[in-house]
Image: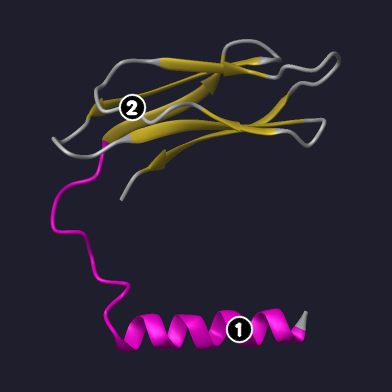
């Protein structure tokens, strides 16, 4: 655990020193929401997706399974579900590509 913390700290220091944490030069998707439609089914969407940017829906199921949609380049809605019997959604989120 201490080694991992040290590696993360060094990586963050190097990233800051070389500008790796700079803000993006264009806007990221906005107006994004992820929600549960049922215990096993989730939806996600972003209302504004600038040209050249993307987003995706992510879920975590009670059986420990993570899943992500394909990258979306428009404001179209997407969905995912927990695929294994008895598994229910525990978390939903939106990832921005940048």
Residue 20: image x %, image y %?
A: 31, 74
Judged from the image, the secondary structure of the residue bearing numbered disc 1 is: helix
The vertical placement of 45 against 50, above or below, is above
Q: Earlier in the sequence, mark 1 or mark 2?
A: 1
Residue 46: image x %, image y %?
A: 31, 27
The vertical placement of 27 against 67, above or below, is below
Residue drawn at x 21%, y 59% is: 24
Give the farthest residue toward the front.
Answer: 70
Magenta range: 2-29
Q: How far separated are the C-alphas under marks 1 and 2?
A: 33 Å
Name the residue that disc number 1 marks: 7
Residue 77: image x %, image y %?
A: 37, 15
Mark 2 nearby-residue class (10 Å; few <14, some 14–19, many ≥20): some
Colour scheme of this structure image? secondary structure
- Any magenta on residue 3? yes
Quadrant containing the N terminus in the rendered view = bottom right
Q: Quadrant of residue 36?
A: top right
Name the residue that disc number 2 marks: 72
The vertical placement of 42 against 91, above or below, is above
Residue 21: image x %, image y %?
A: 32, 72
Mark 1 nearby-residue class (10 Å; few <14, some 14–19, many ≥20): few
Residue drawn at x 27%, y 79% is: 19
Locate residue 34 relative to residue 3 in the image: left or right.
Answer: left
């Amino acid at each position: 655990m201490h080694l991992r913390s040290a590696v993360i700290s060094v990586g963050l220091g190097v990233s800051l020193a070389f500008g790796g944490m700079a803000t993006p030069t264009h806007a990221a998707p906005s107006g994004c929401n992820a929600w549960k439609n049922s215990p096993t089914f989730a939806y996600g969407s972003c209302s504004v997706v600038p040209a050249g940017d993307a987003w995706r829906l992510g879920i975590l199921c009670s059986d420990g399974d993570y899943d992500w949609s394909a990258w979306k380049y428009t404001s179209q809605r997407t969905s995912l579900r927990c695929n294994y019997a008895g598994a229910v959604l525990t978390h939903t989120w939106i990832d921005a590509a940048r």
